[in-house]
Image: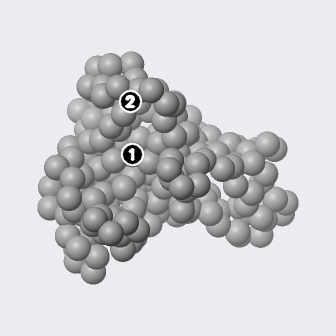
Amino acid sequence: MFRDEIRCSAPTDKNDTASWFVRLGIINCGLTEAKACIGRIVGVWTEQGEQLKKYDPLTLFWARQDATRTGFIRVNIQGYGDIEYLDVAQIKKSDSTPLRLRLVLPLGLTKGDNESLSPGSEPVFRAGTFYIQVAVYSDESNIPPCWFKITCSKEVSECGGSIPCQIKKEQPKFVKRSFRQ
């Protein structure tokens, strides 16, 4: 089960700015632990239904993980309603392209455009509305891919200001048939 949330976090480096994080709370409603969980972006589409080819299925970081300090680590989610947050995107006030997907990227990528087959070294969007499919897998079970609509404005406020993005579970109109929701 998913629960969406957008949080602001103070900068972790001296010369950095605050960041907003678009997160999905992954709730284990089962009775047993879900072991070695990963969350993946299955694909990204524009509001008009154009698939951005550079976002082939890629793994997302969990909250409080990053490429430089912790690396990616699978998480265990206990049963009976335990929750872990999956970071979908990060929005920084200092960026000209505010929405940066929190993807675990292979080393050695170069910058890619929307038509490239690789996300490149900068998995970013400009302000606007996008649809993403997210799936969560564990050793024993999985959550089938679900659609989410993300809308971000050009204006990114400081923490405590207006939230720059919205995320909600919503299947786009351009999809006629999809995985079970």
Q: Is residue 36 left or right of residue 113?
A: right
Q: Is residue 103 left or right of residue 37?
A: left
Taking the spot 27% from the left edge, 59% from the top edge, the residue there is 92
Q: Is residue 173 visible?
A: no
Instruction: Say if 130 sits above or below 45 in the image.
Output: below
Q: Which quadrant would the C terminus be assigned to in this image?
A: top right
Name the residue that disc number 1 marks.
101
Taking the spot 36% from the left edge, 55% from the top edge, the residue there is 90
Residue 84 location (% of width, % of height): 62, 63
Colour style of the rendered protein structure: one colour
Q: Are marks 1 and 2 in contact (CB under 8 Å)?
A: yes
Q: Secondary structure at mark 2?
A: loop
Q: Residue furthest bottom?
A: 160
Front-lying residue, 123 or 170: 123
Q: Secondary structure at mark 1?
A: strand
Residue 82 location (% of width, % of height): 70, 69
Taking the spot 23% from the left edge, 73% from the top edge, the residue there is 158
Residue 161 location (% of width, % of height): 22, 77
Q: Which quadrant would the N terminus be assigned to in this image?
A: bottom right
Q: Is residue 99 visible?
A: yes
Name the residue that disc number 2 marks.
119
- Residue type (three-letter) at the residue carrying disc 1: Leu
Q: Residue furthest front?
A: 14
Q: Quadrant of residue 175?
A: top left
